[in-house]
Image: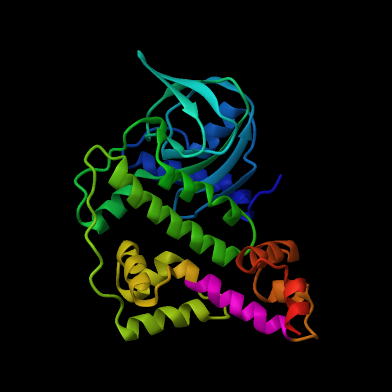
Amino acid sequence: MSKSNLHDHSGDLSAAAQRSNASKGVRGRAADAEMARALGTTPFRMALDPSGGGIAHWKHEPLHDIVEPMSDHVIMAYNGMVQRMERRSGRSVSPGTFRRGVVVIIPAGSSSRWDIPKPVDVVQLYLPPAMLKRVADEAETATQTDLLDRTAHPDPITSRLLLGAVDALDGNGPLDALFRQQLTELLATRLLVAHAGSPTTLQPVVGGLSPTVLRRAIERLRSDTDVDVSLAALASDAGLSRFHFCRSFKESTGLSPHAWLRQYRLDQAMDMLRDPDMSVASVAAALGYASQTAFAAAFRQLTGETPTEWRHRSR
């Protein structure tokens, strides 16, 4: 079982998120804590963000229990065997079929009984209502942020995005954290467009970042020190909301902030690997990866080769 280092602080972060949401009128246990209780296990991987929310990968046995109200919206993408299931909320019964390409949405504060007869492999997003409202306010077009109950609802876009987050639950801290933050913003926007009581229509991007603002953002991303490269810090430095910063940065560079940083780190890795005196382990450590294995997996995902294979071929 593999867990992000952030998981070590899940109790504190969950409690903080629960108190924060409770103060905004959202009642319920922190989502990760309620899921652990209902599923009777711990997540296979999990990363919780200090500002609230998180992503968790669960593999659990059949479920026949009530999931009590939670302080976060919970969005799930299914990754296991095809199977029929049933969800009951009061007198409402919602049967469905779990398969790749469908999503489940449990709005914050709601409760339902689940009957799932077979083992489950699922990735969950925990989205604080306050975060969804912030994204809606920044988009400047959303009229409400109440999410609809969804049971095995077809949505291949949301499913693909969420399942793609699994690889970012381990490995390089700053890079993976930026990816998760950016993905959460993107998923929140997607939920407003496709799963809110009053769907949002997003306006097209008009213009990118000014040269000065773009240069400052790139300098922050390139920094070799412990400078904050979170999405919140990048957006604040640019004087923009996170929503508008992401869209404008991509308009200017053709890449999202995470994709830009990932390419920059890959270029750094290749430069270091050309130095015969640097071991692969030293390169991994210099780039901030948690282990040589995590670095090798990330490198192979981008190049199709391990660092050692690339080094031999590039000589």
Evaluate whether residue 70 shows in this view: yes
Q: Exactly how many numbered labels are in the figure?
A: 0
Residue lying furthest front: 313
Magenta stretch: includes residue 272: yes
Residue in view at x 66 percent, y 49 percent: 3
Q: In the picture provided, is 190 more to the left or to the right than 116?
A: left
Span of residues in magenta: 260-274
Q: How far across and how far down the image is residue 191, in percent?
A: 34, 45
Q: How far across and how far down the image is residue 291, in percent?
A: 73, 64
The answer to which of 94 and 108 lies nearer the viewer is 94
Q: In which quarter of the image is the N terminus?
A: top right
Residue in view at x 74 percent, y 66 percent: 292
Q: Where is residue 27, by image quadrant?
A: top left
On screen, residue 304 above or below 216: above
The answer to which of 49 and 255 lies nearer the viewer is 255
On screen, residue 185 above or below 125: below
Q: Where is residue 104, by image quadrant?
A: top left
Residue in view at x 43 percent, y 71 percent: 255
Residue in view at x 70 percent, y 68 percent: 305
Q: How is the image coloured?
A: rainbow
Q: How far across and how far down the image is residue 199, in percent?
A: 24, 43
On screen, residue 153 above or below 190: above
Residue lying furthest top: 91
Magenta stretch: includes residue 107: no
The answer to which of 226 and 164 lies nearer the viewer is 164
Tell me which secondary structure the magenta stretch mostly adopts: helix
Q: How far across and how far down the image is residue 253, in percent?
A: 39, 76
Evaluate whether residue 228 shows in this view: no
Q: Where is residue 276, by image quadrant?
A: bottom right
Q: Quadrant of the C terminus?
A: bottom right
